[in-house]
Image (tube, rainbow, N blue to C red):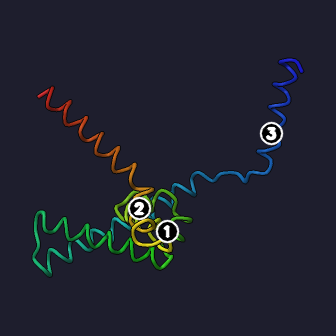
């Protein structure tokens, strides 16, 4: 096979594979992600206003309580199987807020709980979220060092 024949073969194969792919609906997917992500953030804002007015929380207490409620809600919906359905329909709109992080911790924990509490639940809980935590800490450290060097 010559180089030209290989190129035609590869192009024909790629065209054949793409003939089975449904067309991607970018606008529809972005709209769903925007709506669901905005809805999750609106629920978080409702929790914040509720805690501020009813329990008279402020500052770090208010932020912490709001975050805890959203994490609890994300874990609860993951446990009930609802968050996975939301994620299938909303895409990135469901993984960006803090509830998506809660889902990424709770899902592997539920999946591997049959292997026991130590080797299953505890060992596999951060299988998805672990790299996010590691690279988030490293990026934060790098930015802090750069800021320290500049300032």
Q: Quadrant of residue 59?
A: bottom left
Q: Residue at x 23, y 39 (%)?
A: 141
Say which of marks 3 and 2 sits in front. Answer: 2
Q: Is residue 91 above or below residue 107?
A: above
- Looking at this view, is 43 or 119 the one in front? 119
How much space separates mark 3 and mark 2, taking CA atoms? Answer: 43 Å
- Looking at this view, is 42 or 86 the one in front? 86
On the rendered structure, is 33 left or right of 8? Answer: left
Among the two numbered marks 1 and 2 on one chain, the one whose residue lies closer to the N terminus: 1
Q: Quadrant of residue 88?
A: bottom right
On the rendered structure, is 70 left or right of 14? Answer: left
Q: Residue at x 83, y 18 (%)?
A: 3
Q: Is residue 24 above or below residue 120?
A: above
Q: Which residue is mark 2?
A: 123
Residue 66 location (% of width, % of height): 23, 69
Among the two numbered marks 3 and 1 on one chain, the one whose residue lies closer to the N terminus: 3
Q: Which mark is residue 15?
A: 3
Residue with the most extreme bottom position: 54
Q: Is residue 30 above or below residue 54?
A: above
Q: Which mark is residue 112?
A: 1
User: Around disc 3, counting alpha carbons within 10 Å, would you say few (fewer than 14), some (14 to 19), or many (20 or more)?
Assistant: few
How much space separates mark 1 and mark 2, taking CA atoms? Answer: 9 Å
Residue 27 location (% of width, % of height): 57, 53
Say which of marks 3 and 1 sits in front. Answer: 1
Find numbered disc 2 in the image and state the secondary structure of the residue it sits on: helix
Quarter of the rendering occupied by the C terminus: top left
Among the two numbered marks 3 and 2 on one chain, the one whose residue lies closer to the N terminus: 3
Find numbered disc 1 in the image and state the secondary structure of the residue it sits on: loop
Residue 105 location (% of width, % of height): 40, 63
């Amino acid at each position: 096979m010559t180089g030209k024949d290989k190129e035609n073969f590869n192009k024909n194969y790629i065209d054949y594979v793409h003939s089975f792919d449904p067309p991607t609906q970018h606008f529809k997917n972005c709209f769903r992600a925007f709506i669901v992500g905005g809805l999750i953030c609106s629920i978080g804002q409702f929790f914040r206003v509720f805690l501020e007015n009813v329990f008279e929380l402020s500052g770090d207490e208010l932020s912490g309580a709001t975050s805890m409620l959203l994490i609890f809600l994300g874990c609860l919906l993951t446990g009930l199987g609802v968050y996975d359905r939301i994620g299938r329909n909303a895409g990135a709109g469901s993984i960006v807020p803090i509830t998506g992080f809660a889902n990424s911790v709770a899902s592997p924990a539920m999946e591997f709980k049959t292997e026991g509490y130590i080797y299953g639940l505890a060992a596999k809980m951060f299988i998805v979220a672990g790299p996010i935590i590691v690279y988030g800490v490293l990026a934060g450290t790098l930015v802090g060092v750069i800021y320290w060097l500049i300032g």
